[in-house]
Amino acid sequence: MTIDVDKVSQLSKLKIDADKMPMFEKQMNDIAQMADVLAQVSAQQLSDDTRRALLRDDTFIGAAFGNDKAMQNAPVAKDSYFCVPRTVE
Amino acid sequence: MQLYEYNAFELSELLEDKSISSVELTNSVIDRINAVDKQLNAFITVCSERAIGQAKSVDEKRINGEKLPRLAGIPIGLKDNISLSGVKMTCASRMLENYIAPYNATVADKLETIGAVLIGKLNMDEFAMGSSNENSFFGAVKNPYDTNRVAGGSSGGCAVAVSAGEIPCALGSDTGGSIRQPAAFCGVVGLKPTYSAVSRYGLTAFASSFDQIGPVCRCVKDTALMFDAISGHDRRDSTSAQREYLSCYDSITDNIKGLRIGVPRTLFEDICSEDVLDSFNSALAVLEQFGAQVVDIELENTKFALPAYYVISSAEASSNLARFDGVRYGFRASGCKDLNDMYISTRSEGFGDEVKRRIMLGTFVLSAGYYDSYYKNALSAAKLITCSIKDQFEKVDIIAMPTSPETAFKLGAKTNDPIEMYKSDVFTVFANLTGLPAISVPCGLAQNSLPVGIQFMADSFCEQRLFDAAYAYECARGAIAKPSI
């Protein structure tokens, strides 16, 4: 099986430079080939004992930090809002 | 002997009887960092002023007669994917180059509460993805035994800083061997605790079902001391185990008479270098002399381990790293024409090649048509391996194997061949796939004068058994040569 790196990069919201595309194609297909052995996994003898995390009570644990701290790392912010390029004309 | 050369438990005694002050110790450590780190590149951020402030505060409490915990006044470093409030946390990525953590990770909170001096943030592979610490936006970390060689990864900064005497202890994170493999390469002790024993709150997620924070130290007793300080239930981590933890440090013993050690020889004999095998076998002989029983065991389905690890961890990484989109924090590309362009440009310019590779691999194995054959089969493989290893703990107390198939390799030797790089984790991924605890302890230097590590793995929450075996071996082995840096 061959990975279509161009398609996967679009799904991943990544753009791969043309000069690096052959390298990524080779390396990712080598990795997929390594993982092809997983087709031999026989899961028939597995019981359905999937571990699930214990659910915690739906209660307030405590404030982590306020608005100012939450916004302090925003690349662009105004009046406590995150700003992004216009999406509606 | 300089202060920075002592182990943490020894420093604790010196501080307790007021032979030294925490300020003196912290200054000694800062001087050491200034003297050697330019050659090693272990630190991304050094918080000298903050650390001295913490040290002064501890000294005042001690002068006032307060009884303080053992790690009070001891300088400790944090891998740069662990949040320390008000300090940069870069994850060694351009994406977070200027990110200031707005809150403390639970482990940072715990250490600060007991008076530990948090001295700085340590270099790593970008977002903890790598086995050599060459994937850092801030440059590769160098091995103190030979600066032309890698430190191992992804917690390479932790292992190097501890090995070179820059700090006595560090906290790293281990997703597929990221604490134990660099510890082995740099001649220090590294523990990956049982999954859920240590809170992951405030640790930047890579593969959430495998990630675990753990200590890197120069000796086993310090490792136990650090584990005691950071383990325990945390409501803010929904996977955190609710159980009681007894002090491993107080219970540690070198009496391993009758300890049954299982050795899965067929797993590693054909892929280890001769040097590594020799050191490993010598370590086993020492353990036998001290009363342990060494028996050969067979583990099943081991050929699935490495592929299953890379499929699952990449799948989780692709989901976890979707949050880096340039909106709320971190890097944002400039000159973008619309929102979609901003997402793509930000991620393409902000992430390095290894991170991109894993995001794409994870996206691929989770996509329609491939989910069952890759991701679902990988989960089944992890389950089969867990059953196989758990069965062995009916017959043996711990399992021993080399930490890595070879000693530290040359810088650049594997950067163009990800599969060769991934093979460095071939023995460490078992503990992550199964959630079991594992420790790497130095077992001497190979003929090339580089450290070799032996890895012990135990059943869930049996860290004490690991510490006892490792401590007994460490006492019998004696000191190994320190790096001459």
Image (cartoon, rainbow, N blue to C red):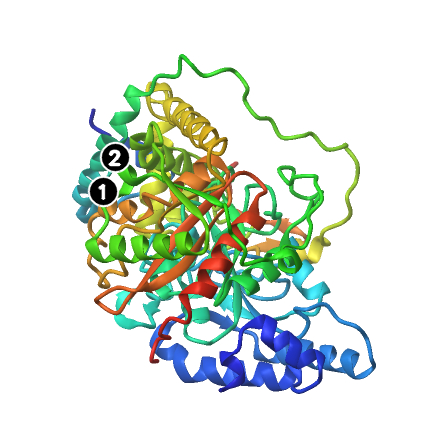
Q: Which residue does the numbered mark 1 point to in the structure image?
A: A24
Q: Residue at position x 20%, y 51% from top?
A: B416
Residue B255 location (% of width, % of height) = 54, 55
From this viewpoint, is residue B152 visible? no
Residue type of the residue flagged with mark 1: Phe
Q: In the rendered view, does A70 fall on the left or right side of B289?
A: right
In the displayed structure, B30 sits above or below B294; it is: below
Q: Residues within 10 Å of mark 2 (few under 14, many from 20)?
A: many
In the displayed structure, B133 sits above or below A64; it is: below
Residue B277 location (% of width, % of height) = 26, 52
| Dot 1 or dot 2, earlier in sequence | 2
Q: How many marks?
A: 2
Residue type of the residue flagged with mark 2: Val
From this viewpoint, is residue A26 visible? yes
Report whether mark 1 lies on the same chain as mark 2: yes
Please report contact status of discs 1 and 2: CB closer than 8 Å, yes or no. Answer: yes
Q: Residue at position x 50%, y 31% from top?
A: B394
Using the numbered discs, state the Cα–Cα distance from disc 1 to disc 2 in whole angstroms: 7 Å
Residue B172 location (% of width, % of height) = 50, 57
Q: Which residue does the numbered mark 2 point to in the structure image?
A: A5
Q: Callout 2: helix, strand or loop?
A: helix
Name the subunit of mark 2: A
Q: In the rendered view, does B209 fall on the left or right side of B377?
A: right
Name the subunit of mark 1: A
Asked which quadrant contains residue A3, the reply is top left
Q: Callout 1: helix, strand or loop?
A: helix
Q: Nearer the viewer, residue A11 or B289?
A: B289
Residue A35 location (% of width, % of height) = 28, 30
